[in-house]
Structures are given as structure tokens and as C-alpha cells.
Amino acid sequence: MASVRPFRGLRYDPTVVGSISSVVAPPYDVIGSEEQERLYRASAYNVVRLDLARDRDRYAAASRTFAEWRERGVLVRDREPSFYVYSQRPRLRSGGEPERFGFFARLHLEEFASGRVLPHEKTLASPKADRLALQRACGANLSSIFGLYSSPGFSLATLAARTLRASPWADFEDGAAVRHRFWPLVDADVQEALRRQLESRTVYIADGHHRYETALRYRDERREETGLRSGLEPFDYVLAFLVNMDEPGLVVLPTHRLLRDLPMKPAELVERLRGCFHLEEVPRAAGAQGLVERMRPAAGERRIGVVLRGAPRFFVLVARDGDNDARLSGSTALRRLDVTLLHGLVLEGEASILGLDAHREAEAGRWSYTKDEDEAVARVESGEMAAAFLLNATRVDEVRAVSEAGETMPEKSTYFYPKIATGLVFNPLED
């Protein structure tokens, strides 16, 4: 069902830029101003100068820089079409070091209605407009989507064993103690085996929903401009990093919600919460870790942590109706999620306690996210934020079930870790 093909990637020339570690960056949407400045200082060729330029007209600047780097040989096009195998091995707080293998490819763009590529999260208008302007300016995919497919018993590392025995093109550890390794895979027989492996699979978008929808819009624009509608043009594909969800190494972290303001007093909110949930109190002295420990659910339970500015205690919300609350709309797969419970009963919509519009609040800067529970609690304790809502991680099987039900979760319901480094390979859309 999913169609992938190798491509002639555009990559940095290490003899020009030096260490690849100095020119890659996290995805644009997790880069704050301090990190942007650090990346600018790391190298005159860091990809942040393309993906998140700080010039007044950053799209024009990215276009000029991209063209200049190609002309000067900073970026060089591979001679042979390749898939690109990419391994990441983080050090987790638990002490584990799971290694995740995946590969970069051109993934054929499909409308979601086809069932070949499925989303699981809602998107916002402004990030899509931003990514579309950048793609128009550069005529390339600078960063990839992250897709999952299910293939029990299949191992990419085993299939590509000969390639992986060679020295990787890049091998470095980043500041978050994640080791990154990267190999071009040029063996035609292995490429064909990998292509066939995907042709009967559905791809579930794990990360990069905005980029995928942007690529669909760009494809439609280019079809109108060129009249080319074969379905096999470069703009009919998007750069994708694809991982088998049935292999070990796939880590999903929770994404916690932070609100800068509350439309009611904390005491009133607590009473309203008490009417919707079983409410457990946690001493504030227990800290973030104590709260997280109390949030661990038993079978059939759903638990959400709450931190309120000025409240003497933390709280844990326990769902009254187990793992399928009839007060929520949508499929069973969607209703069973902690994030659906939080949004549907507490945060947004007419039936919720706070009645917020998540998109409007996020775009106004009054709603933010973090994967770090210590940060979430600290930002409320400091007075910067009015409230934090802490979630348990959404499981991969839950992502799949919601996607297959044809529904989407609230934005940023998952945090697949580690994030894919931007800058390892680009997908030019000219041929």
C-alpha cells in the first residue's frame, strides 16, 4: 500500500563543513531562541540557517543560502539513488539504551482517505503556512516526516547487515546523549527487498503532520503550474523516515500541557474537577517525581496529574468510568486515551470545564507543551504558568487504533523519542 523509492539525496560534504554533528539540528518546532542562537554559533553551515533562519525575510534568506551552499559544494547531490539507514540510541532515565533503526526514503504522497498513509494528530494553520513558504522557497524537503509501519518479524538491521558492517557516513553523540549513525544504502537488491516490504503496509504518521499536509498542498500547486499529473514526479513524494513499530527501540514519551492563564480561580477549578473525576491529593513536597509515581495507572485506569499555581497540593484525576468514558465523543479507540479525557472534559470544547480553544490558545502563546515533568512543575511553581496537566505516554498500539478508526488526537498527543536530526539528508524536488 505504501510506495517508497530511493533517491539521490543532497548531503553535506564533511571536507567542507567538518563534523556532521556541528551542522545538524533538532526539528524546527522544538528549537527555542536560545537553542537557535547556539546552533548559529555551532557552524556557519548549520541547517538551522535554512530550516529556521532568523533574518527578517527568512524564506528569501533560506532560498539564497540553499542555492549558495549547493553552488559552492557545501551540499553535494549523491550520484546513486539510495535509501539511508539511520540509527539512534538514547540514554534513558531508566538506564536503558534502546537502539531504533529506520530509513529515509521518498514516500509517495497519498490523500488520507486512501488509507495508505494515516494521521493521528490534528494540525494548526500557522505551522503549515510556514512550512509551505519554506518549501516553495527552496524547492526541497529540508526535514522529514516520521512514519511507522507494522511488519512483525522483519528486521531492517538484518536486511541491511552488509551496509551496517561498513563505517557509517556519520557517527556522533549529541548534547542529549543520543548516539546517531547514518549509512547510505545503495545495494539494489536490498533496496528492492525494502521497497517490497513496504508495498503491502500502511504508514502511520508519528511526527511531521504539518510537513505532510504541506507536501500535499505543494504537490497540488506544482501539478497546476506544470500540468504534470503522472503521480511519479518528484513533488509527488515527500522525504520520510520510516520505522517498523514491531521492532524494539521505539520510545514514546508523554507531552504535558501548560496554561499561562486560567479562566477561573484554582479553588473553583478543583471543585469542578471533583465533580468529574475521583480526585486524589498529593503533597506538594513530593515534587514532580512523587506526582508521576501517583499517576501510574492500574489496568483499566486512566490518571492525569494537575499542578495549579497557588494551590497547596498537587492532584491526580482518576477517570470514573475506567478506560472508555461515555461522556466523550468519537470511537472507542479515541475515547480510551488520557489525552482525549483531558481535552474533552477539562480543557477544550463546550462540554469541558475550561471551554478553551486549543488552537487559538496555542497560537496566542498561552498554551505550551513539554515532555519533561520536572519542567512542567517548575514553570508553575515559579509563577510563569497557571497550570500544568501531566499525562502518561500514549502507546504505539493506541496511535495505530486511532489512525485506523479514521480519527485524530489533539495536537502533540505523542512525543516519539529521540527526535530525528534535521540536516543528515535533504530531498531536492527537481528530479
Image (cartoon, grey):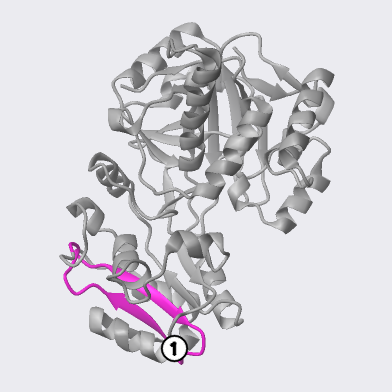
Q: Residue at x 29, y 27 (%)?
A: 114
| Position above or below: 404 against 413 | above
Q: Quadrant of residue 166?
A: top right
Question: Of residues 136 and 232, which is closer to you in this image?
Answer: 136
Please state if 181 lies on the left or on the right of 246 as rendered. Answer: right
Q: Residue at x 42, y 52 (%)?
A: 414
Please state if 384 lies on the left or on the right of 392 as rendered. Answer: right
| Position above or below: 234 against 399 | above
Give coordinates of residue 96: x percent, y percent. 48, 51
Question: Of residues 63 and 144, which is closer to you in this image?
Answer: 63
Q: Quadrant of residue 46?
A: top right
Question: Of residues 256 and 101, which is closer to you in this image?
Answer: 256
Magenta residues, as a range?
Answer: 300-324
Q: Is residue 263 magenta?
A: no
Give coordinates of residue 98: x percent, y percent. 47, 44
Residue identifier under label 1:
265
Give coordinates of residue 227: x percent, y percent. 50, 12
Q: Amino acid at mark 1?
A: Lys
